[in-house]
Amino acid sequence: MDAVRVALLREVLAGTEWVQATRRFAGTLRGAVTPHGGGLLLVGSTGYEPWHLAAHLDDEAAWSGLPELSPTLVRHRVPGGAPAHLAVGLGRLAAAGRGETLLVVTPEQPDAGLLERVHDARRNGATVLALDGGDRDLHALAHDALAACPAPPDGTDAAPADLDLDTVQHLVSAAAGENSLPAPRGHRRFRDRLARLADGLTAPPPPRW
């Protein structure tokens, strides 16, 4: 979803809580991943891998001049022959600690094993954020959380104020790279994201995902 589509979606959602909520959450994410921190870890659940969000955050990191937004995707199952940036397993969470940010993204209930790893990461000093379907156990572990609406059954239309997790991820990733959000510690300024996007059309950043 490009910047123009995000802008149109925000117009449709004007008057709902979503524009403010996604920008608020994006501000938390952007403030947590400081330039001198330990990095951003992105993990899903056994049945949901947020590779799409990983790709969008990687693009936002390049376009907005915020390399700290580029995540490390942590995978429950790493296929043989995967490139290095897609070969990080759950063992990485055991090393997560102070200065690092762990973003958990899943529409389904996380299993006990994942919750235990998230708990350990928080206890070791990592900042825990959650984008999910509203799981109470995960929200209890998170420093900040944003719950999306369940996807509507096939053949039905969602209400304008009901956003599924994929759409919420688009709004959050776009907002995380925008200048309108307060920069960490209030001392950094960046060019407008749309100008960055326009400049990048002639030489887009090479895809990693």
Image (spheres, rainbow, N blue to C red):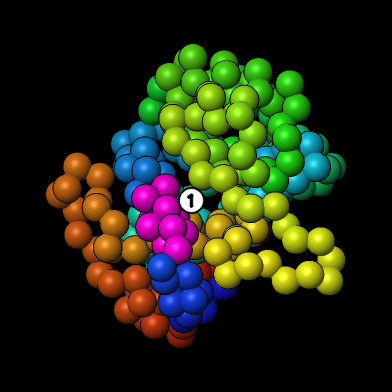
Residue underneath mark 1: 70
Specify the quadrant of the image occupied by residue 74: top right
Does 62 sit left or right of 79 as displayed?
A: left
Residue 133 rendering spot, x and y as whole percentages = 65, 44
Inspect this view and state whether residue 98 appears: yes
Q: Looking at the rendering, which quadrant does residue 179 occupy?
A: bottom left
The x and y percentages for residue 203 are 47, 79
Question: Are there few (<14), some (14-19), or many (20+) residues within 10 Å of tag 1?
Answer: many
Residue found farthest to the left: 187
Residue at the image position 50 percent from the left and 39 percent from the top: 145
Residue 83: image x %, image y %? 71, 49
Give me the residue at 83% from left, 71% from top. 155
Whether residue 78 is visible to the viewer of this picture, yes or no, is: no
Q: Residue at x 49, y 62 (%)?
A: 171
Is residue 125 positioned above or below 24 on the image? above
Q: Nearer the viewer, residue 198 or 112?
A: 112
Magenta stretch, main secondary structure, is helix
Q: Is residue 120 above or below residue 166?
A: above
Tell me the quarter of the picture where residue 147 sits.
top right
Per the rendered image, the range of residues in magenta is 16-26
Please, what secondary structure does the residue beneath circle 1 have? loop
Q: Does residue 19 show up magenta in the picture?
A: yes
In the image, what residue type sits under mark 1?
A: Ser
**Quick check: 25 above or below 171?**
above
Q: Is residue 47 magenta?
A: no
State which quarter of the image contains the N terminus. bottom right
Where is residue 49 shown, x and y percent of the image?
A: 72, 47
Residue at (34%, 63%) from the top-left corner?
178
Q: Nearer the viewer, residue 190 or 82?
A: 190
Relative side of 130 to 112, left or right: left
